[in-house]
Image (cartoon, grey):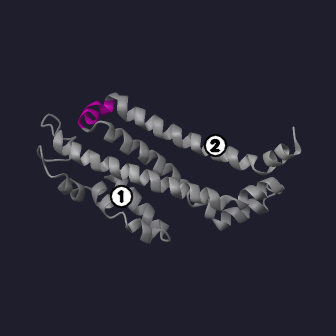
Amino acid sequence: MSVALKSWRANEGPKHLITMVWIAVNVFLFWKTFMLYFSGAQYYYLHKMLGLGLCISRASASVLNFNCSLVLLPMCRSLLTFLRGSQRVTGRRVRRLLDKSKTFHVACGVTICVFSVVHVSAHLVNMVSFSVRYSEDFPALNVAQYRGQDPRILIISTVPGVTVSSYEIFWYTHNLFIVFYVILMVHVAG
């Protein structure tokens, strides 16, 4: 093995390994949730009503939840200081990896932004589907009150719709992460 390859493996290998594991977890969560809503018997009628919009909105929500739970960890100074000071984290490799925590924070943030767009778009498709595919057979599943109801009314009259239409709140709450997580939990409750 060449010296350059050994050096790369020692310096960059752990970062790329963590990135690959993180990507694999994101792909797994998206696929597992997508398939649950696509073929799960308990979601059969809801899937018939909403189609792929349901699967994509729920799968992207799983990825968002995972990344929202991770995004703050790499920027937590107390955690990084604790890890640097512990006896097990004395090696230069681990310290170098901890120094690259901002890169992981940015990767989580970009993923949150991308999947937020996917999630919001899927919700918008779902609102149109609720209106177009309204079924009197399943009143508990319907967000719409009748076939052809204006999807814009559905968007502003549901909890997820209100949080979607007020997405600029995210930018104001970036530094007020507690408010962001409260809004996230309210959205999920809807």
Q: Residues within 10 Å of mark 1 (few under 14, many from 20)?
A: few
Compute the Cα span from label 2 to label 1: 32 Å
> Is 140 drawn above or below residue 160 in the view shown?
above
Residue 89 at x, y = what percent?
Answer: 79, 55
Q: Could one spot residue 88 in this view of the protein? A: no
Which dot marks residue 20? 2
**Label 1 sits on what residue type?**
Val
Which dot marks residue 186? 1
* Most frequent secondary structure within the magenta stretch: helix
**Label 2 sits on what residue type?**
Met
Discs 2/1, front: 2
Query: In the rendered image, which quarter contains the N terminus?
Result: top right
**Residue 103 falls in image quadrant:** bottom right
Residue 80 vs residue 53: left or right? Answer: right
Residue nearest the observer in this picture, 40 or 11: 11
Q: Which residues are magenta?
A: 42-49
Counting residues from the start of the chain, the first of labels 2 and 1 encountered is 2
Residue 36 vs residue 143: left or right? Answer: right
Is residue 160 in the magenta section? no
Residue 170 vs residue 77: left or right? Answer: left
Which dot marks residue 82? none
Is residue 44 in the magenta section? yes
Residue 52 at x, y = what percent?
Answer: 33, 37
Q: Are marks 2 and 1 in contact (CB under 8 Å)?
A: no
Residue 55 at x, y = what percent?
Answer: 36, 38
Secondary structure beneath label 1? helix
